[in-house]
Amino acid sequence: MTIRTNTPKLLDDPPVPVQATLAAAWTSLMFLVIYIDYFHLYQPGEIDVIRGGDIFAFDITPTLMTIIFVVIGIPALMVMLSRTLPARVNRATNLVVASLYIPVMVFNAAGASWDWAFYYALTIGLEVLILAFILRAAWTWPRGAASRPGWVATSR
């Protein structure tokens, strides 16, 4: 019988920068939105409706396609902005955009049939949870000690 004398080492869990957390959350939201739209095509008769010129209850027009592009493009832009903006602007931008996106995601249920209510409740619920995560991550952004201009911190 072998007796273990040393204890196993725990995995290192380094802190993840808030910017990386936000970028990952926006990436997750973007993929989710795209896949939800893709899986929508599997609904019986939906491709025929799209060929007829409608998406949900809306006519397919250049204006609608522009709106759809913006709805998908903003999370893609937020991935980059979350990694590149200065902290104060980054926090404010994430709080504003995530807050505005919650009603946008809920509006995605417009024109949905009751047959698919559970599907839309599940998908929209997950989108809103990701946006709530983004809001929480931005809201609780750690604060550093304020330094006075012209002063250099030294260690003694």
Image (cartoon, helix red, strand yellow):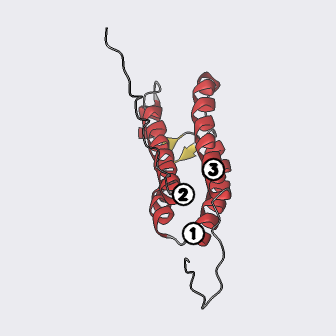
Q: Are marks 1 and 3 in contact (CB under 8 Å)?
A: no
Q: Secondary structure at mark 2?
A: helix
Give the labeled residue for mark 3.
Answer: 104
Q: Position of residue 87 (x, y in %)?
A: 57, 69
Q: Secondary structure at mark 1?
A: helix
Q: Nearer the viewer, mark 1 or mark 3?
A: 1
Give the labeled residue for mark 1.
Answer: 87
Q: Relative to residue 11, is residue 134 drawn left or right?
A: right
Label 2, label 3: how many angstroms apart (C-alpha)?
A: 24 Å
Q: Is residue 53 visible?
A: no
Q: Secondary structure at mark 3?
A: helix
Label 2, label 1: how many angstroms apart (C-alpha)?
A: 9 Å
For residue 115, which quarter of the picture? Answer: top right
Q: Position of residue 123 (x, y in %)?
A: 57, 34
- Residue 68, above or below 143: above
Give the labeled residue for mark 2.
Answer: 18
Pointer 1 or 3: first along the chain: 1
Q: Relative to residue 33, is residue 103 drawn left or right?
A: right
- Residue 59, above or below 44: below
**Counting other residues with Cα less than 10 Å from the Cα at mark 2, is it few (<14), some (14-19), or many (20 or more)?**
many
Q: Are marks 2 and 1 in contact (CB under 8 Å)?
A: yes
Frontmost residue, 124 versus 67: 124
